Image (cartoon, rainbow, N blue to C red):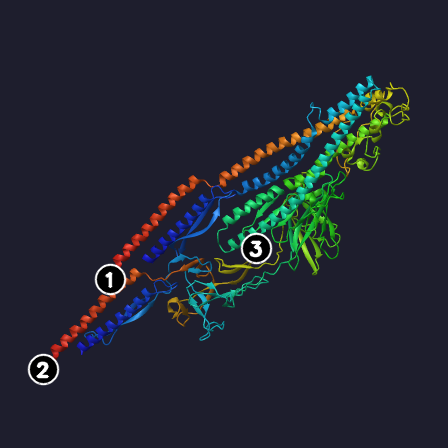
Amino acid sequence: MSLFGAMSTAISGLSAQSDAFGNISDNIANSQTVGFKGTGTSFEDLLTSSTATDNQPGSVRAIADYQNNVQGAIAQSSNPLAMAISGQGFFPVSQVANGQIGTTNFSPQQYYTRAGDFKMNNSGYLVNSDGGYLNGWPIDQSTGAVDSTKLQPIQVTQSVYNPVATTKVNLAANLPATPAANTPISSQVSVYDTLGTSHVLTLNWTQNAADSWTVAVNSPDDVNGAALGTATVNFGPTASGNPVPDGTVGSITNGTGTLSSAAFTAGAPAALNFTSDFGSGPQTIALDVGTYGQASGLTQYAGTAYQLEGITQNGAPQGSFSSVSISSAGDIQVNYDNGQVRNVAQVPVTVFADPNALQRQNGSAFTATIASGDPLNQPAGSSGAGSLVTGSLESSNVDIATQFSNLIVAQQAYSANAKIVTTADQLLQTTLTMKQ
Amino acid sequence: MGINTALSTAIGGLANVNAGLSVVSQNIANASTPGYVVEASTQQSLTADGIGMGVASGPAVRVLNAQQQTDVFNQNAVVSGLKTRQAALANIDSVLGTPGQGNDLASLLGQVQSSFSALLSAPDSAAQQNATVNAAQNFAGQLNTLGNAVTSTRQQAQDAIVAGVTTLNTTIATIATQTKQIMAAKASGQSSADLESQRDVSLTQLSNLIDVRFLKQDNGDLKAITPSGLSINFQPGAANFATQTTAIGPASSYPGGGIPAITMNGVDVTGQLAGAGALGGNIDVRDNIMPGLQAGLDEVAQTTSTRFQAQGLTLFTQPNGTVPSGGGVPTQSTYLGYASTITVNPAVLQNPSLVRDGTNAVAGSPTGASAFTPNPVGGPTGFTTLISRVLTNAMGVQAQPGIAQPAPNNNGLGPQGNLVGPFSGGGSLATMTAAVMSGEAQQSSAMSAKLDTEQAVQTTLTTNLSQSSSVSVDNELSLMVQLQNAYGANARVLSAIQSMWTQLLQTVQ
């Protein structure tokens, strides 16, 4: 009995070692596959009978030892859309439904991968070399909020960037305390209407008395006439009656036309609101002249000439698609040629309680199993999720030197098992020759 | 992860050296390119899960002291503005003549005086009468030359403004295109260093034209403001300057005097462009400097004409034989550009003996000239009353004994009535002429001196900037040696890995 038992034990050893051999060859074959995770082999003995006095030979079986949580080397890539995860986690990807290659009918099955060699395809999807469509959280364009309840394939549309109407103009300048006679003081700034057309706004400043100025806002393109109104801006405590240091904005009063302003509050933003109409409806613009009582924005200090330090506005003309880039936070950014950037989606990193229990799929992909735990989508770099390295790729985590040493061991173990079989055979022959 | 990581790290090292070397070669190749700013390669170490993963090369960046560059841009505007003004004044200097050479206004006036003195001793000499008329003609001719030079200089300034506005628009359009490329390069993580150096050349052009401050944004976008209140967006159509060509006459002025405004998107911004920069310089030449000289010349022409007329000899007139009336509002409105048209009275030209006899009777006034009756036709040929009046009164400081000549207008001059002349108080015609000439000469030499100073500052600033930002071939070569060594070291790691591989493969039989 034991002789046959020993033989079958040796056979199980042969089978286990050939399994290990298979894993090693799979690992070496994929040693250059992006995002590939190697499989090691561990062995388990199987028992038939073992008592205090008697032990029957059992057998051995090979168990795959997945190394899905072992980091691969990260190398720089020339592909700007390439990403690698440094740390734990996977990119959520979708694949097109069976037999529907070339369409955008996605299989409901969610896949996960570490292969981050994404490229934009002709439909604007980010697809890796294994056909995985990168998923992300959509970002609401009006509020900028990330909807982390929805995970869907990211599609970048190469649309134009809608123009942004100006709502705010920031002015930083010094009005001269003693202006030169006959020198008009004015600032021009281009603002944009809702159609992205540029219009000039002119701010004309006239000194009424010491520390008191009148600003007239004009726009030649306004449909209701060029003059939008005037207001009085008082500097310092004497002219404004408010406790502010000399030379800083103390009050904005006497708004005429469409001009209005909030009353003085120490430390509150000093702004003038006015409404213009460039033909597409009223457009309210706030002229921000700094903060009440602080030497920021508009001031009135010594001098005879107006000194403009900066005048900016928050509108933008329409822009056309220029490029797509990925930030290290995982934001998919669409860049437009008007300098505007739009975040269209955020790529989460999916983590599992036991990533080694994931079900392997073709194309370095994985699917969730009961043993792996539920997928948990996290922003990159937070709550245990790895961070993103953009413009880089994660190589296979297989180390060939280790595989070779395993190979040597497997080879020797296989030979040893084979030796048991041949020895058992000889013993059986001996047994058989006992009876002639 | 062993040997594979070592391999990819070494390859990353080689790639980084390659990137560094390409920056070095770009620097050396552009060592003498104008406006090129030396570039430096950037790199950072890569880690994953706390393990070193080699090096990542970043985009090349420029080594530039932004403050120095801003100073140079500002100084460019100051110098080009002064250069424009100085060139315009040099234009006038060239026709002003040289004192003592007999070709300047003061000497020509002196010749008029000496010819009258000569006539005093020979009042009946027709030759001397002709010589006097000739001297007067020469004086009027020089006034014409100066007046025309002033007007043509203003015309040149106006033409330069029109050309400058065109250059302004094309430069802004160029910068807009370059900015767009830079933003695209930055957005996709590429190096924008070379594009930025190209853009700086355009920015230098712009800074020569107008006094402008550039605000560079992180995303590569650029905004520009002028201290006088303009803001220029480098977006297509965001800043469109315009003006028209026009023929400038002595009476042309801005605003409202026939000279078109410079507009930005339809809004008059002429006032904001005046000041530093070539465009501002030309506006100053056209609207202030040259009209100021014109006002002085017109005042000399008008005062000379009226003082002669007041003594009974209408020697200088307009081509139609009349002296312009004064008393307009603004003061010079009735005789703007008179210096360009003043001539010797056609009646005197026809009959030179009138310089002895007089052309008109003078009623006499207790505050002005005394009474005078011209020598009638057939009167005594030795008539010297008029000649004496001309020598002592018209060309002197008193209209009649004890009554000073009225002072020339010195304020409220020019087409807009906003200019101030070079005169101080009353005085003789010679004093006035000298005041006009020395006023121009002082203005011109002061401008040249200021230009020299500012140019010296510009040279210093430009040298500082180029010292800190231009390519130092020595540095680049030493960097190259370092890179070569680094390449060798990385390659050495590669060859070590190669021999390890060989050994490893030999172990598995």
Identify the residue at the far top of this view.
Answer: B121
Residue A255 image position (x, y, % from top left): 74, 51
| Tag nearer the camera, 3 or 2 | 3
State whether discs 1 and 2 lie on one chain.
Answer: no
Spot the residue most to the left: A436
Q: Does label 2 lie on the same chain as label 3?
A: yes
Find numbered disc 3 in the image and state the secondary structure of the residue it sits on. Answer: loop
**Could you tell whether B506 is left or right of A435 in the image?**
right
Q: x%, y% of residue A149?
A: 52, 68
Question: In this image, B411 relative to A389: left or right?
Answer: right
Q: Is residue A177 visible?
A: no
- Judging depth in this view, the residue of A89 and B436 nearest the camera is B436
Give SS at disc 2.
loop
Q: Are marks 1 and 3 in contact (CB under 8 Å)?
A: no
Label 2 belongs to which residue? Answer: A435
Q: Amino acid at mark 3?
A: Gly
Q: Chain of mark 2?
A: A
Q: Which residue is mark 3?
A: A339
Is B364 or A275 nearer to us in this picture?
B364
Image quarter (top left, top right, bottom left or bottom right) of the N terminus of chain B: bottom left
